[in-house]
Image: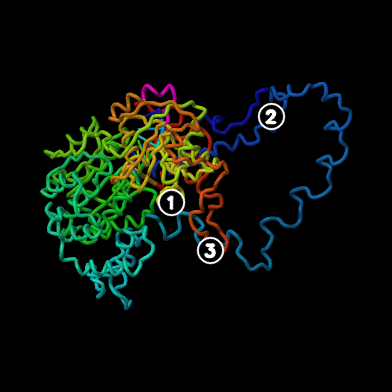
Amino acid sequence: MTQHHQFDPESADGRAKKPRHKKHQNQSYGERLAADQTYDARNTARSEDRKPVKGYRSEQPRADRGQRSDERPRTERTERPQYNRDDRSRYNRDDRPQYNRDDRPQFNRDDRSQGDRPRFNRDDRPQYGNRNDRPQYNRDERPQFNRDERAPYRRDDRSQGDRPRFNRDDRPQFNRDERPRFERSEKSYRKDERVYSNDRRDAQVEQAVDLGTVAEDNQFAALGLSPRLVQRLARDGITSPFPIQAATIPDALAGKDVLGRGQTGSGKTLGFGLPTLMRLAGGRTESRRPRGMILVPTRELAMQVHDALEPLAHVMNVSLKLIAGGLPYPKQIDALRRGVDLLIATPGRLIDLCEQGAADLGAVEIAVLDEADHMCDMGFMPAVTTLLDMTPPEGQRLLFSATLDNDVDKIVKTYLKDPVQHSTESGQASVSTMEHHLLVIEPAHKQSLTAELASRDGRTIVFVRTKLGADRIATQLRDRGVMAAALHGGLTQGMRNRTLDQFKDGSVPVLVATDVAARGIHVDDVGLVVQADPPAEHKDYLHRAGRTARAGGKGAVVTLVLPHQRRGMMRMAETAGVKAEPVRARPGDELVTELTGGSKPSGFPVKLPAPKPQRFGKGGGGRGGKRFGNNRPGRGHDNRGGSGPRRTGNGPRRTDGKSYQH
DNA sequence: AAAAAAC
């Protein structure tokens, strides 16, 4: 191949290609905005620089163009008899008789349309010739609509004038606490129960009437919780606290800092949730200054905690708000401005809102860190400390974690004062209803074995190492007739929610997930966890395994181990306290069928169920630019656009193809 | 080492 002197605008002016959005963790939102604008300015200037070079090719004599002429042998060229460029007689450019450019009589640009056309000559338009002379809308001088001063749309002020309708607080009926049934939170809490039978309603009314009595031996009452909370819990049949709750709640209620260690699924959510609600109840929250904050590592977990606490917060008259990425800003900002007592948040979005001034953590009396060991992973740590630094140091802090290693320890030392430590279990797999299997397999068998294991009846979670792997294995499973869907952080929040919902309601019985689903996520009746890729470390093993055998149910954990992973896996199992002998396995083995109950993949490809009834003709036929769905490169998958290596993590993007060294 | 968490 010969080399071409291709014009490359980027290298021509000596500038390397720069990414439009260069991210820096220590840049604030505003700073990045400014950087973007300077980038735009520079970019415009650059395109002007380029202009003189335009036409580069044709303006240079052929001889100067070097290698180009080598492409075809010159001799061939000169030997061609006719149509030598200069001899062509017809249509010689200069002889053409008509319309020399300047002589054309009519349609001279400036003359036309002056006569009878009534419309504006371009330059005669009276207004705003010079961009800068426009009198109004100078950005900085706009008198009104200063964000904070907008008069008419202040939530609290509107509707005062002539509107006859109820001012929010004046509504006479439905005193929040007295509505006997069909409370909003009740409904959302019981999302899974779509049908309200009469029996059910009657039962609820009866219970509502019966609110006064709590069983004498209700142990939650003994912990010092408000009767309202105890009643509300009892209504859901929660009358005896789990060990971790019994241990931590009294200390947390006493205002001490608490360090809680417990297995996932041991009831930590209530362990920190109840004392938090107790503390916040009855207080007054100023606009944008929440008094409580619960930090969790993933959005799914945030939603889960939010949903679990909502009905309880409701009876305590505590307002709470889910603050997480992937959800619209306005509602979150609005809620903060109105004043919300308790935030349940993922770190990124909360920092963002603080930078925007939408939230101020200076009034936080009680801060909770859930899954702290995960929150202290490399890269997650700065966000967590940033947030904790914004809360007043004299506030109460609760920290819950499955393990206490180096980084968690650092947080504990820095942010907790004389913490009371409670650990209910050793951080080991001690659930007796859980069985563990290590299958040593050939690499070539991994796919079919995964499919066999996953084709069982009941819910199954397949864990894989990477996002790409999750997508791939889910597709492979569907191709083999196993209804499976992928769940990982590269999907839009909508997809993540949908997939999790489908998994919960049973329409998709197999979830192929990265470690995003390993911690804290609770789904009932997951009978089998398959680790198609072994976990990276023993903690991950325990977290993944913890998705099954929950609440006393039975469950099995099967790990597929390639021969070269065997040694590492054995060490990991030992550290995790898992007693399992590695067994060689091939597709069709008795052990495998035993685990799966004998069902086999059909081999006929299946398709994911349609998520929702389709809405047609949105706004008259337009489809809002989503014609290809969200699940494709360049859309939704936040880090999958274009070519090049797939990005992982949310850290600053590096452009030279190398990765950051720690 | 990957994944997670902000547009």
Along the polypeptide, which appears first: circle 2 or circle 3? Answer: 2
Q: CA distance from mark 2 to mark 3?
A: 54 Å
Is residue A21 or residue A580 the one in the foreground? A580
Protein chain holding label 2:
A
Labelled disc at residue A506: 1
For the residues carrying marks 1 and 3, which lies nearer the camera in this image?
1
How many other residues sit within 10 Å of disc 1, few (<14), some (14-19) or many (≥20)?
A: few
Q: CA distance from mark 1 to mark 3?
A: 33 Å
Answer with left or right where residue A455 lies relative to residue A344: right
Q: CA distance from mark 2 to mark 1?
A: 69 Å
- Looking at marks 1 and 3 on the same chain, the residue that comes earlier in the sequence is marked by 1
Q: Which residue is mark 3?
A: A619
The answer to whether residue A372 is above or below residue A580 is below
Which quarter of the image is occupied by the C terminus of chain A?
top left
Circles 2, 1 touching at the beta carbon (< 8 Å): no
Work out whether disc 1 and disc 3 sit on a shared chain.
yes
> What chain letter is assigned to the residue under label 1?
A
**Identity of the amino acid at label 1?**
Gly
What crowding class fits label 3: few (fewer than 14 Cα within 10 Å), some (14-19), or many (20 or more)? few
- Residue A561 lies in the magenta-colored region: yes
Q: Chain of mark 3?
A: A
Tell me the kind of residue under disc 2: Gln
Magenta region: A560-568
- Taking depth in this image into account, of A510 and A277 the one nearest to the observer is A510
Mark 2 or mark 1: whose residue is earlier in sequence: 2
The residue depicted at 51 percent of the width and 33 percent of the height is A644
Horizontal side of A38 relative to A369 (left or right) equals right
Q: Disc number at residue A60?
A: 2
Query: What element does badge 3 sit on?
Result: loop
